[in-house]
Image (tube, helix red, strand yellow):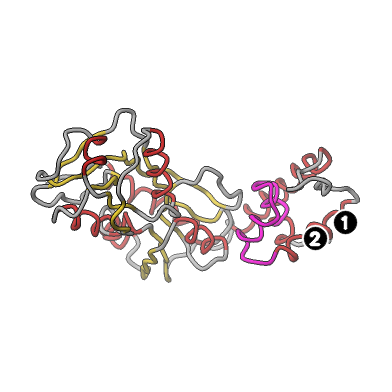
Amino acid sequence: MPNIKTLKAFRSVADHGSFYAAAAENDCSISKISLQIQALERFAGIILFDRTHKPPPITEAGKLYLDKVDAVLSAWEELENSGVEVLEGDISIGTVHTALTGMLPQVLKRISTELPNFNLTVIPGYSHFLEEEIIAGRIDFALLSRPEQRSGMLQYCPVLEEELVLIAHESQKGDTPEECLRNNNYLMFDPNTRIGAMIENLLANYAIRSDQSMEIDSLEGMLAMVSHGLGVSIVPMSTTLKLPDGVRILHFDDAPSRQLCLVYPKIGRKISLADTILECFRMDQANGSCLTR
């Protein structure tokens, strides 16, 4: 009989349409995922994925079976969450670097007040890394950029929308984002991060090609570089983070927004704390969500 991990592996492959992506999400080898799927196929007596195609799509029989697996996983989730409420202990919260010096300190203060019997640990990292850490059970909650493709094992709760804007020193040339980018050095976020990829797409949509001079992975560091006239940058409008003197904001037409989500496992004892932590984030959001001086 298949165990819960095998059922979760099936759900993961179905979510991502890829054995490779499911292996990455579950922090294991592709061969292990493949063996789990084969074992489930033998147990069910059906073919779940059409291996004549690459990547193998789920079969019609597999889709019907997935509904049954989801019912089992939901029942397991309810069983997991019906235990004794966690009243004290440790809470680990991951965060993307761009939120670390913005909204997060105030939120952590609220959480400490609301949950005084818990010790908080903050783990900074890229969004995809934090998702993997939650799935592996090494982090309880995380504040990260919403992915285009979400894991079926995780709950994603939006807490903040941040418009992408251009920041430039008042001494730098340009009255529009396009002019600033064409006439000055460009300071960029790592394009392998979700926020970096969003910004690259924005530049591509505007058909803007700029001279890259530096790559920086924190919003605070980006503001410091811009304040010294080392270049211009595109950043998410961030709650509570103050602009240095001489730094101005320029808005794009129809600029996209980065959505920050509180993410946590659908199954786990500490998810009973999720509502309290979510409320702390939303109380902070109500106090403002833009760059200020």
One can see residue 287 in this view? no
Q: Where's the N terminus, which quadrant? A: bottom right
Within-10-Å neighbours for mark 1: few <14, some 14–19, many 20+: few
Q: Given contact means CB atoms under 8 Å apart, are the residues at marks 1 and 2 in contact?
A: yes
Give the residues in magenta.
9-29
Q: Is residue 26 magenta?
A: yes
Residue with the most extreme top position: 253
| Numbered mark located on residue 171 in the image | none
Q: Is residue 213 magenta?
A: no
Residue beneath the point at 62% across and 52% down = 78
Residue beneath the point at 55% across and 52% down = 154
Image side of residue 2 versus residue 161, left or right: right
Q: Secondary structure at mark 2?
A: loop
Image side of residue 220 versus residue 281, left or right: left
> Main structural element of the magenta stretch: helix, strand or loop?
helix
One can see residue 292 in this view? yes
Disc 1 marks a residue whose amino acid type is Phe
According to the image, label 1 marks what residue?
43
> Between residues 277 and 181, which one lies in front from this camera angle?
181
Residue beneath the point at 17% across and 37% down = 174
Disc 2 marks a residue whose amino acid type is Pro
Q: Position of residue 153 (x, y in %)?
A: 60, 52
Q: Secondary structure at mark 1?
A: helix
Q: Position of residue 109 (x, y in %)?
A: 26, 60
Within-10-Å neighbours for mark 2: few <14, some 14–19, many 20+: some
> Between residues 206 and 117, which one lies in front from this camera angle?
206
> Between residues 257 and 135, which one lies in front from this camera angle?
257
According to the image, label 2 marks what residue?
2
In the rendered view, tell whether residue 206 sits above or below residue 269.
above
Rounded to the nearest angstrom, the CA distance separating label 1 from label 2 is: 7 Å
Q: Position of residue 285 (x, y in %)?
A: 28, 44
Q: Position of residue 121 (x, y in %)?
A: 37, 69
